[in-house]
Structures are given as C-alpha cells and as structure tokens.
Image (tube, rainbow, N blue to C red):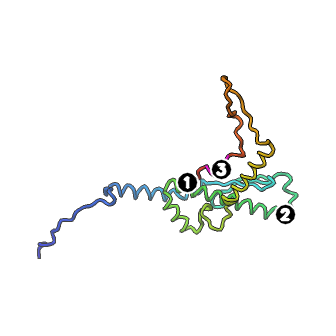
C-alpha cells in the first residue's frame, strides 16, 4: 500500500514566536539554572542578634551554624534561657537566610519558578508566610509617625531654622533634613 493521501503538508508554527533552537536554548538555560539552585541556597546566609546584643549568630538557609558570638554577659542568662534564646535567634537568622536564598533564586529563575520551588519544598518564603509576624500595619506606622511629628513640633514650637542666601531670601537649610518626617513607606521593596 502506498502513502497516497497521507502526504499532507504540516505547517510549522513557532511557539510564542520562538524558533525551535530558541526553545531548546531556553530549556537548557533553565535546566542549568535549576541545577544551580542548590548552590545558590547554600550561599545565602542570615544573621540575627538578641535584643540585648548578648549574642549574634549567622546561619545558612539550611540552618547550619556558620558563626556564633556571645558577649561575656550571656552567662547571666542561665543554661535553659540561653539555650532557648539561641534557638530563637537562630530561627530569625534562618528566616533571613531562606528569604535571601529565594531572592537569589528568583533573580535567576524568575518569580513563578521560585514560587513553585517554595511550594515543592514546603517552606514558603518568609515574605509570603501568612502566619509570620509582619511587624506593624501601615495604619499603625502612620499613627506613630503622626505622634512623632506632633511631639517634634511641640518641642520645637513649630519653628524651623531658616538661613538667608546671598540675596537675603529665606532658604531652608538642606542640612536640617528632619528624620521624623521621613516616610519609609515611600521606599520600594523587592519582595
């Protein structure tokens, strides 16, 4: 039997506008990037210290202790409290290291692949963890800021220092930038 009727012409349509060579190159690059995830995560570190600055430690994203510093006053905590404090500080440092590792992976693989890795590992990025303490709310930050501004105004009597330029015109001194009026909410966050 011949191939009559089966000699149909198949139209080649590039996927997403990319050629087959481009798709193969992208797949290879992604495979190499995925192979480097382990190395990237091993490079990420996190450092934390306690409130009293009696200890500081650095760990990698897997929790391996890389550096530990204890102040001489750390012995005053006693063995149980010192041990639990070390664990608490190590957990904070590890969350920082995990976030740093995901940030590095996201730069290499993109946000979607990083999110997939988070899902597969069972360890969400601390920035996405719904149960993580995210600090104060925007509303609370604004309320505290307003209180600080009112307090500053009360202390200074609302007066601002003004200098005169050569022509006698009043010019606010650039060196008098008031940190109380700085709003960190205007800064952009990567994650």
Q: Is residue 91 left or right of residue 26?
A: right
Q: Is residue 187 left or right of residue 146?
A: left
The numbered mark at residue 104 is: 1
* Mark 1 secondary-structure assignment: helix
Please identify the quadrant where the N terminus is shown. Answer: bottom left
Q: Whole-percent x and y of residue 27?
A: 40, 59
The residue labelled by disc 3 is 184
Q: Whole-percent x and y of residue 123?
A: 60, 66
Label 2 or label 1, whichever comes before in sequence order: 2
Q: How many marks?
A: 3
Q: For the point 79% across and 52% down, which residue is it?
A: 53
Q: For the point 69% across and 53% down, which residue is it?
A: 47
**How dense is the environment of label 1, judged by Cα within 10 Å: few (below 14), some, or many (20 and up)?**
some
Quadrant of the image occupied by residue 124: bottom right
Which of these two is toward me, 183 or 20? 183
* Mark 3 secondary-structure assignment: helix
The residue labelled by disc 2 is 79
Residue segment shown in magenta: 182-186
Q: Are marks 2 and 3 in contact (CB under 8 Å)?
A: no
Which of these two is toward me, 104 or 129? 129
Quadrant of the image occupied by residue 140: bottom right
Q: For the point 68% across and 25% down, which residue is it?
A: 168
SS assignment for the magenta stretch, majority: helix
Which of these two is toward me, 33 or 122? 122
Residue lying farthest top? Answer: 166
Q: Nearer the viewer's eye, disc 2 or disc 1?
A: 1
Q: Nearer the viewer's eye, disc 2 or disc 3?
A: 3
Distance from label 2 to label 3 (Cα)? 39 Å
* Mark 2 secondary-structure assignment: helix
Label 3 or label 1, whichever comes before in sequence order: 1
The answer to whether 159 is drawn above or below residue 142 in the figure is: above
């Amino acid at each position: 039997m011949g191939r009559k009727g089966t000699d149909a012409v198949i139209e080649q349509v590039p996927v997403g506008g990319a050629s087959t060579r481009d798709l193969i190159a992208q797949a290879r690059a992604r495979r190499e990037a995925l192979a480097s995830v382990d190395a990237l995560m091993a490079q990420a570190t996190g450092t934390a210290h306690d409130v009293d600055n009696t200890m500081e430690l650095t760990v990698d994203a897997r929790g391996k202790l890389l550096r530990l510093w204890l102040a001489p006053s750390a012995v005053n905590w006693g063995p149980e409290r010192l041990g639990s404090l070390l664990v608490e500080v190590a957990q904070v440092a590890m969350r920082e290291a995990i976030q740093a590792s995901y940030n590095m992976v996201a730069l290499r693989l993109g946000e979607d692949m990083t999110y997939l890795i988070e899902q597969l590992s069972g360890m969400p990025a601390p920035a996405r963890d719904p149960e993580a303490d995210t600090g104060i709310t925007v509303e609370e930050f604004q309320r505290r800021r307003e209180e600080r501004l009112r307090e500053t105004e009360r202390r200074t009597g609302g007066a601002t220092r003004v200098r005169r330029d050569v022509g006698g015109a009043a010019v606010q001194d650039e060196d008098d930038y008031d940190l109380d009026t700085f709003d960190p909410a205007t800064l952009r966050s990567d994650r």
